[in-house]
Image (cartoon, rainbow, N blue to C red):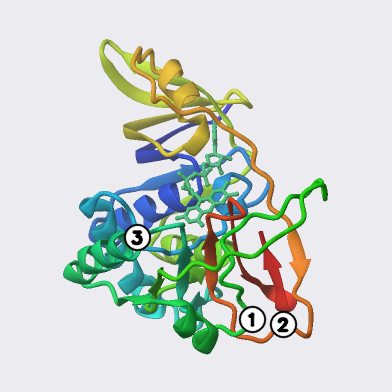
């Protein structure tokens, strides 16, 4: 079985692992191997992500991270160093329809603007003008059909005008291309089945095919599977993280619905939706 050595082994070739590889490669000449158990890139969360780049988070730190992320999405070619990247930023706006009072929306709008986000508060008239295809009704539909729907319009909404969504798989492919150009080795179908330690120090990984890679540093970027890697390393502390399936559906947008439709976070329906290729929507 192969026995190799690398300065850094990264377990997981999703957007996190690949971004770490890219960033370290840009700043050093360390040898880096990214290992992923998938047969192709993006078989974890990244490939299924809606990749909405909203900045309205509760904690200021998260607002700032998302805001700075948007700078990267907007300057993707520069960030990746690729003249013609696959991924595209769709800054079509994010509309929040959340049962908020006018005061609540104003509070959040001010909080976001203070962090440099281009957020505006709109009312029902603004909504009709900006997005004529979007109903202001905040009453959820009764999907059983037993209760007749009676509209009750909301009048306080928030729009983040400077963001939207990014192509998730495109982003991953681009970062992988950039990382490889920087000398990173990316291996698919390479499942890590054990983390090797010497004393209290992690010194490498064992692969399903029996191969071993000794490494000065092993980085756990296994996303929802990270606790399995922690357990392999004998770590008792695990993240309170439970992989959970959620459903995403694709619907064609009816031709008679006036455009544009932004990314919409819809508290009435308990859903979010955004445009997807082919003039459809993912929900
Ligand atoms: C349906 C859905 C919608 C989402 N929507 C949004 C959104 O709108 N906006 C947003 O910001 N975020 C969204 N997210 C979250 C976002 O996609 C994730 O936070 C992000 O993709 C996590 O990236 P990651 O690299 O940490 O994990 P992953 O992409 O899951 O990568 C982990 C990788 O580790 C590999 N791996 C695991 N175990 C091993 C092993 N033993 N050996 C080798 N490889 C291994 C897996 O194959 C996988 O490729 C969404 C997620 C989902 C699932």
User: Can you say which quadrant of the picture contains the N terminus?
Assistant: top right
User: Can you say which quadrant of the picture contains the C terminus?
Assistant: bottom right
SS assignment at label 1: loop
Looking at the rendering, which quadrant does residue 101 occupy?
A: bottom left
Q: Which residue is mark 3?
A: 56
In primary-sequence order, the first of circles 2 and 3 is 3
Where residue 46 sits in the image (x, y, percent)? 54, 52
Where residue 167 sits in the image (x, y, percent)? 55, 68
SS assignment at label 2: loop
Against 136, is 203 above or below? above
Hey, which residue is sitting farthest right in the picture?
Answer: 145
For the question of whether residue 11 can be seen, the reply is yes
Q: Which residue is mark 1?
A: 133
- Along the line of sight, the residue nearer the viewer: 15 or 164: 164
SS assignment at label 3: loop
Residue positioned 53% across, 55% down in the render: 267
């Amino acid at each position: 079985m192969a026995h190799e050595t690398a300065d850094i082994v990264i377990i997981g070739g999703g957007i996190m692992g690949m971004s770490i590889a890219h960033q370290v490669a840009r700043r050093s000449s360390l040898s880096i191997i990214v290992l992923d158990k998938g047969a192709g890139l993006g078989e974890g969360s990244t490939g299924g992500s809606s990749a909405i780049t909203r900045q309205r988070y509760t904690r200021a730190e998260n607002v700032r991270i998302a805001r700075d992320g948007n700078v990267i999405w907007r300057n993707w070619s520069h960030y990746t160093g690729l003249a013609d990247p696959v991924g595209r930023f769709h800054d079509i706006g994010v509309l929040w329809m959340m049962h908020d009072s006018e005061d609540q929306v104003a509070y959040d709008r001010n909080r976001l603007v203070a962090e440099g986000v281009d957020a505006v508060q709109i009312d029902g008239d603004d909504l009709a003008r900006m997005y004529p295809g979007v109903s202001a009704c905040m009453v959820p539909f009764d999907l059983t059909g037993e209760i007749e729907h009676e509209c009750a319009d909301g009048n306080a909404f928030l729009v983040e005008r400077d963001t939207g969504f990014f192509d998730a798989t495109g982003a991953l492919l681009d970062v992988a291309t950039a990382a490889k150009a920087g000398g990173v080795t990316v291996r698919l179908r390479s499942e890590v089945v054990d983390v090797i330690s010497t004393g209290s120090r992690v010194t490498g990984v064992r692969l399903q095919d029996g191969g071993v890679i000794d490494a000065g540093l092993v980085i756990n970027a296994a996303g929802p599977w990270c606790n399995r890697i922690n357990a392999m390393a004998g770590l008792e502390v695990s993240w309170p993280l439970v992989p959970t399936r959620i459903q995403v559906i694709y619907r064609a947008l009816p031709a008679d619905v006036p455009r544009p439709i932004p990314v919409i976070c819809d508290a009435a329906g308990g859903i979010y939706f955004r445009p997807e290729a082919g003039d459809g929507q993912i929900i």
